[in-house]
Amino acid sequence: MKISEFFETTRISFEALSSNKMRSFLTTLGVVIGIFFVVLMGWAINGLDSTLDKTFNAIGTDMLYVDKWNWAGGRNWRNVEARKDITYAQALEFCKRIKSAEVVMPQGRAWGRQVQFKNQLLNGITIMGVPHQYALTPSGNVFQGRFFSQFEDMNSADVAVIGYNVAINLFPDSNSLGKTIKIAGRSFTIIGVIEKRGTFITDFMDNQCYIPLSSFFGIFGTTGRSISIAIKAGSEEQLDEVRSEAVGIMRAVRNTPPGAEDDFAINESQAFREESKTMRIAVYGIGLGLTALSFIVGMIGIMNIMFVTVTERTKEIGIRKALGATRTSILIQFLTEAAALCFTGAVIAFVICSIAIYATVKIFDLAFPPYIPPALLLIATVVSILVGIIAGLIPAMRASRMNTVDALRYE
Amino acid sequence: MNTPIINIEHIARVYDMGGEKVHALRDVSLNIYPNEYIAIMGPSGSGKSTMMNILGCLDTPSSGIYNFKGLDVKEMDDNDLAEIRNREIGFVFQTFNLLPRASALKNVELPLVYSGVSRSERRDRAIKTLEEVGLGDRMQHKPNELSGGQRQRVAIARALVTKPSIILADEPTGNLDSKTGVEIMRLFQELWKRGNTIIVVTHEEDIARHAHRIVRIRDGKVESDTTNPQSAIA
């Protein structure tokens, strides 16, 4: 087979397809749907990954949180519920003892609170009582104003730093800095806004308000709640060392009997990675299943239509052979046609996918970027062409083996 | 005379039709020399189609010797046969056998595609050949936009474009009215004058009359092989 012949064959293939547009389109629909699923799945996983990365960075990849509750599930909920609260005294003792951490601080948390600005109410806000060192963690990055100072912290100042969503919802078109909001009946002046950190799985991060820990205890009291401890290890490499020291100290502080299970949790951003694994497997499984299914259906359709095409064009095959087409030429001609059919399907699928993904992102305002990785397009294209070749193989072989004399006589 | 293009000695062709052996050709010997104009005649069932298929390298004999320009056709495989058809033989069929979706030009280019000629050269040669058969103004027309005579001219151009050693025409006027038929036969005469070797397979005496040598086949054997005194050899 010569190069010039191959180009001509490819041209002929597309011409043959376009002479039967409706049939070609219907035939390739299986491939269109198959590729659609592959691309969609790739996009979802890609989006998931980039979202997770964002999440880890927002939480801090070198952060540990000692807490009563585990972030990720999988444990006996009753056992966890039965754990004793971590008291403020225990937290302070822990902070004093730990040596390997770069920064360590207790923090109080009050869930589902109300924040009021004039007569505007915002529900479901988490009030966080934190020391001024919180500004040193990735979660404390303010994009407007500043975090509170050591002085304000020590004096239980009535200052608040608000999360991104709180700012957007209470002050949609004005600057929130300097405004006064009410938290549990007490007035606070907004001095800073935390940058947007949440993603679709960690949206709660933006629905928080930060006040000095002393002010927090002033409102909510120190008893009846579990204090959590945030630890910044300094780097991901130090996580293991810091974690094991933290476990040791915490057990000592809480008098956990030797041999008993830890009655507290050490949480880190990896917990989300674990959780995302299940999601990933689900997306992969569903995506690959649907893809395989539609490819199989598509393949059967293509094989069927290629048989029809070969029979319809028996005479043409005879003519071509009489004029000097070898078996290989005829084989390649029909394989190219089947591959061209699938390739066309892939192109149609890419267009539909791009529109669908862009529309989804716009309509649902997803944090996922409307981005299809180029490698995925390449793989999808190659797979579609392979599908075409496999589906077209038997019909093309039948065409190539036709007896020239009989084929010429065919009417 | 010089060496023959085609040298056939005692060939036979036997078809196996469900256990029954059909002897389409029994014992045929024939030499065809350059620039001959031969008619192969015979009633239907005489074996003349089989003869034409074998001469055209579409089929191979069961026994005997077939040398095409000194090459043993009987021993050739499918690819060799395709190559020899492509390079050495120009077919003209009764039903024209053009590709319906392709323009006249593309139809004429087709054999050159299989000989690996570049796109631009294919085009140039096809245009030139179509002009030679008087279709310079019909090149972009599809077969269904052409008359029967014009279609046959496209087919003749397609046969000529590879500059083959022989032109093999199977009932070339069978689907044409008599006036157009005469025109086509005149074109063959013209081609012969330009030095082509022409073999016409037909059952019509009127058509055979144009040839200079008439080979009659009956019951799978050569009945007679005569020069045609009536034809005006220019």
Image (spheres, rainbow, N blue to C red):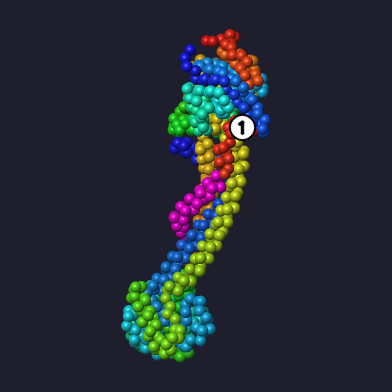
Q: Residue at x 40, y 85 (%)?
A: A250
Q: Residue at x 52, y 33 (%)?
A: B78
Q: The disc labelled 1 sits on which kind of residue?
A: Asp
- Across and down, in percent, residue A385 comes to 51, 48
**Depicted A333 relative to depicted A268: above or below:** above
Is residue A197 visible in the rendered image? The answer is no
Task: Report the front residue among B190 and B29.
Answer: B29
**Depicted A57 relative to depicted B226: above or below:** below
- Across and down, in percent, residue B106 comes to 52, 32
**Depicted A364 relative to depicted A130: above or below:** above
Quadrant showing the C terminus of chain A: top right
Q: Is residue B56 left or right of residue B205?
A: left
Number of dots carrying numbers: 1
Q: Which residue is identified by label 1?
A: A406
Quadrant of the image occupied by residue A162: bottom left
Neighbourhood count class around disc 1 (C-alpha, 10 Å): few under 14, some 14–19, many 20 upward? few
Label 1: element kind: helix
Q: Residue at x 63, y 15 (%)?
A: B223
Residue at the extreme top of the image, as rendered:
B229
- Across and down, in percent, residue B49 comes to 62, 24
Q: Main secondary structure of the magenta part?
A: helix
Q: Residue at x 45, y 74 (%)?
A: A271
| Magenta segment includes B161 | no
- Across and down, in percent, residue A378 comes to 46, 52
Task: Report the front residue among B13 and B114.
Answer: B13
Highlighted magenta segment, given as a residue range: A369-393
Q: Is residue A168 left or right of residue A403?
A: left
Task: Report the front residue among A383 and A361.
Answer: A383
